[in-house]
Image (spheres, rainbow, N blue to C red):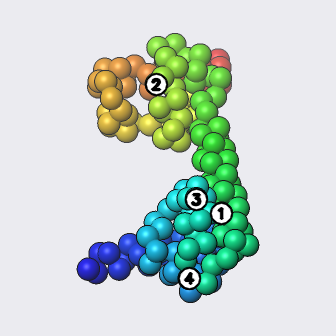
Amino acid sequence: IEKQEAEASEVIEQFMTALDIDEDIATVLVEEGFTTLEEIAYVPLEEMNAIEGFDEEISEELRARAKDALLTMAIASEEELDANEPAEDLLTMSGMDKHLAYTLASRGIVTMEDLAEQGVDDLLDIDEMTNERAAELIMTARAPWFAEEEEATA
């Protein structure tokens, strides 16, 4: 029961924030069985109108706010994905394939410099990554460091 209460209060909190409603309305929604913004956004209006104290205006407003909140969340997660796009130098680096570059980028390793700063262990939890491949990729990413050192001493 405690777990259910915790989940319910989490949903109430989410509804209050996402829909900009007070706790009473959020609580009524949860008591009526709503657990996600999707349900509020796409449930037939008749079903919401049937809730005591809700009229068509309230139902339509809640539905519109839920759709807006979902759209905002979708845009935010899309921007997050874009922000985690690999840089050109990582994508075109020797030994790199597109899938791995995107996997690395999703972990915050976006440039060759980022990769160069990693240790072999940092990459081993990536599917199909071996010690040898991780070491090879990191050394390739570090190659510019050695080139700069040689130029500095030459």
Residue under the image location 51 percent in, 38 percent down: 106
**In this rendering, which labeled residue sits more in front, label 4 or label 2?**
4
- At 31% from the left edge and 20% from the top edge, which residue is drawn? 132
Of residues 114 and 62, the one nearer the viewer is 62
Quadrant containing the C terminus is: top right
Q: Earlier in the sequence, mark 1 or mark 3?
A: 3
Q: Which numbered mark, 2 or 3, is in the foreground of this view?
A: 3
Reply above or below: 68 against 58: above
Q: In this view of the protein, which residue sits in the foreground, 66 or 9? A: 66
Quadrant in which the N terminus appears: bottom left
Q: Earlier in the sequence, mark 3 or mark 4?
A: 3
Q: Which residue is mark 2?
A: 100
User: From where the camera sits, is residue 115 visible?
Assistant: no
Kindly identify which numbered label has been placed on residue 52: 4
Could you tell me if the residues under marks 2 and 3 are in contact, i.e. CB atoms within 8 Å? no
- Kindly identify which residue carries mark 1: 63
In contact (CB < 8 Å): disc 4 and disc 1: no
- The quarter of the displayed image where residue 90 is located: top right
Q: Three-letter amino acid code at disc 2?
A: Leu
Q: Residues within 10 Å of mark 4 (few under 14, many from 20)?
A: few
Query: Counting residues from the N terminus, which is met first, the one under dot 4 or under dot 1?
Result: 4
Residue drawn at (32%, 36%), measured in percent from left and top?
Answer: 125
Q: Could you say which quadrant of the image residue 49 lies in?
A: bottom right
Q: CA distance from mark 1 to mark 3?
A: 10 Å
Point out residue 46 in the picture as x, y percentages from the top left corner.
59, 65
- Helix, strand, or loop for circle 2? helix
Which structural element holds mark 4? Answer: loop
